[in-house]
Amino acid sequence: MKTQIRSQASTCIITRTAALLALALFLAGCVVTSVYPFYTDKDLVSNPVLPGKWVDADATNPPSEYAQIKPLDGKGYWVTLVGAQETNSMEAHLFRLKQQLFLDTFPTNRSLDYVPTHQVSKVLQIVPRLETADLNYDWLSHLLEKHPKAIRHLVLPEKPGEEGGRIVLTADTKELQRFLLKYVNNTNAWNNPSHYKRLD
């Protein structure tokens, strides 16, 4: 029997922003999540421009919501997402596959029984403004309905006993990377770019 995958309206992880480093904490959006990271240590790169405070590039008033990015030991970044009502944190890793930059992020605010989930964004540019695009959840759900073996995944029901649910990728890192490279230039596979400017 074919597994039903529900569309964005009923299966999104509700977050509060779009793209950057899952800056998804400021707007409502739907993100693709993975149990395994999208990078290996050899793929990691660093960029001296990335640390700092970033806000939506269209913001005109003094922002109450922003992302503070600081370097971690090695080639990672610590991201503090400051919102009007709460503050959250995550680790981010900038990595390169072929000639394309990507950003893998996963939250650090979680309970003991929470399974960390990685998210990925394609980095289109860092200067003069940061521009990123998230993997398109709706595109992925349509792909997997037609081709369930396109990439290993689970469909988690929202409630016990319900059919269908939310997609979680279970492929290992090598398979995830092959998938990213296969669709890196497919415009339907990525959401519209989000743009961010520095505050400092």
Image: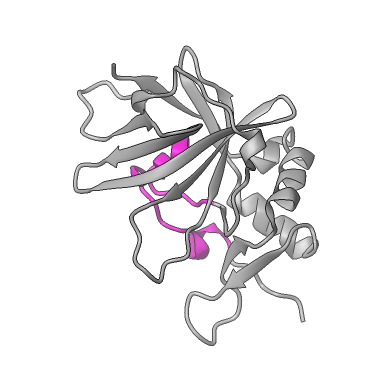
Q: Position of residue 39 (x, y in %)?
A: 63, 42
Q: Is residue 34 left or right of residue 144?
A: left
Q: Is residue 11 left or right of residue 199?
A: right
Q: In the rendered image of this protein, does residue 176 appear above or below residue 18?
A: below
Judge whether residue 18 can be spotted in this image: no
Q: Position of residue 29 (x, y in %)?
A: 45, 49
Q: Is residue 117 left or right of residue 67?
A: right
Magenta region includes residue 156: no
Q: Which residues are magenta?
A: 7-31
Q: Which quadrant of the rendered structure holds the C terminus?
A: top left
Q: How many marks?
A: 0
Judge whether residue 29 can be spotted in this image: yes
Q: In the rendered image of this protein, does residue 114 appear above or below residue 129?
A: below
Q: Position of residue 95 (x, y in %)?
A: 60, 33
Q: Position of residue 78 (x, y in %)?
A: 38, 37
Residue at 33% from the left image edge and 42% from the top image edge: 26
Q: Which quadrant of the rendered structure holds the N terminus?
A: bottom right
Magenta region includes residue 16: yes
Q: In the rendered image of this protein, does residue 129 appear above or below residue 74?
A: above
Q: Residue furthest top?
A: 128
Q: In the rendered image of this protein, does residue 156 appear above or below residue 48?
A: below
Q: Is residue 138 left or right of residue 60?
A: right
Coloring scheme of the render?
one colour
Front residue (pair 186, 87): 87
Residue at 53% from the left image edge and 58% from the top image edge: 8
Q: What secondary structure predominates along the stretch shown in magenta?
A: loop
Q: Residue furthest bottom?
A: 161
Residue at 41% from the left image edge and 56% from the top image edge: 14
Front residue (pair 44, 97): 44
Residue at 47% from the left image edge and 22% from the top image edge: 130
